[in-house]
Amino acid sequence: MRKRVHAVLLIVLVVGMAAGCSRGATYPNREIEFVIPFAPGGPADTAARIIQPRISELLGVPVVLVNKPGAGGALGADYVAKGAPDGYRVLATTNNVLTVLPSTQKDLTFQPGDFAPIGSYITDLSLIAVRSDKPWKTLGEFVGYARKNPGKLNYGSAGAGTISFFSMELLKLSYGLDIAHVPFQGTAPAKDALLGGHVDVTASGFGALGPLLKSGDLRALVTTAAARLAKYPDIPTMTEKGFPEASLNIWMGLFVPTATPQEAQAKLAQALAETMQDPAVLQAVAQAGYHADYRNAEATRELIKSESAMIRNTVQKLGIQN
């Protein structure tokens, strides 16, 4: 009888110690999901793949990329917002999810305040492009045709509420154009639709469209960069056309639910900061056509605040609302 009691007590002690070790385990101790709320091949996906290996190495655990496209990024964001706030599910997204969507979509199941920024790390300047076999060689020619043929043209975007959607809607409203919207579940499908002739025009970043400009498959009409780019001096800007408020670029960041422990947030932030100082990572960023543009958590929070205010003002001014 005494032996049985001792055995039971030993089992209870071992189980209790195991549970205590599990609760006190240092973060991270298992694989981390980077949830990309868009289809593979777009800016968020490409940028995450650039930083994934180095962050995994620094944290000492696997970092797995999970694509959850839909609703302009809202489905993937909701998946992270509603997940356990333990640092093992991270939103790897473009800025539209936390700045554009809340200003253009009435019934979101999450709010920007549901997320804490880890940091932002890459910017992708935007442009508007058509297939090179189309007759419009300049923005003026495109605008002239669209005005004479209201409702005849359509544009593809990465989804309602994305930067590509917002850029095209700003172009339409700036020039008073009637162009139908065809949403896709990410940049890559929208790009493929343009190449396949299923849509007439699209907006995206140089990371996605730059190689197609160089190959001659696409022609750029205008860019949302603040000034003409040295690599593309012939592409005019929306600012020089008189519409600086129509200039919005894509940037990428990492976010976790706000209730995520500070230890986890700090370790993710440190890993991102170190990653964006790695020469190999910076070289990969440049080769992808992006710009390394690291901001820490606080700077990213301020960027979201200022960009959201600008977008809300523009939405109100131009009447963009879904």
Image (cartoon, rainbow, N blue to C red):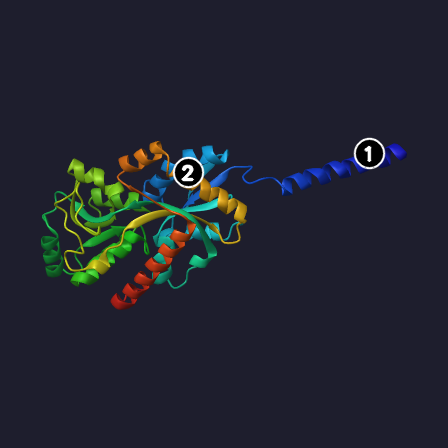
- The amino acid type found where label 1 is placed reads Ala
Image height check: is 173 above or below 217? below
Crowdedness of circle 1 by 10 Å Cα count: few (<14), some, many (20+)? few
Crowdedness of circle 2 by 10 Å Cα count: few (<14), some, many (20+)? few
Mark with earlier residue (2, 1): 1
Give the side of residue 224 with respect to residue 292, left or right: left
Where, quadrant-wise, is the N terminus in this rendering?
Answer: top right
- The amino acid type found where label 2 is placed reads Glu
Q: Position of residue 29 (x, y in %)?
A: 56, 37
Q: Position of residue 110 (x, y in %)?
A: 45, 58
Q: Are marks 2 and 1 in contact (CB under 8 Å)?
A: no
Mark drawn on residue 7: 1
Q: Nearer the viewer, mark 2 or mark 1?
A: 2
Q: Is residue 40 visible?
A: no
Image height check: is 88 above or below 164? above
Where, quadrant-wise, is the C terminus in this rendering?
Answer: bottom left
| Residue that appears at 25% across and 50% down | 156
Q: CA distance from mark 2 to mark 1?
A: 49 Å
Image height check: is 298 above or below 192? below
Mark drawn on residue 87: none
Give the side of residue 205 with respect to residue 261, left or right: left
> Element under label 1?
helix
| Residue that appears at 28% across and 37% down | 286
> Element under label 2?
helix
Q: Is residue 253 visible?
A: yes
Q: Position of residue 186 (x, y in %)?
A: 32, 47
Residue underneath mark 2: 274
Q: Residue furthest right?
A: 1
Q: Position of residue 54 (x, y in %)?
A: 42, 34
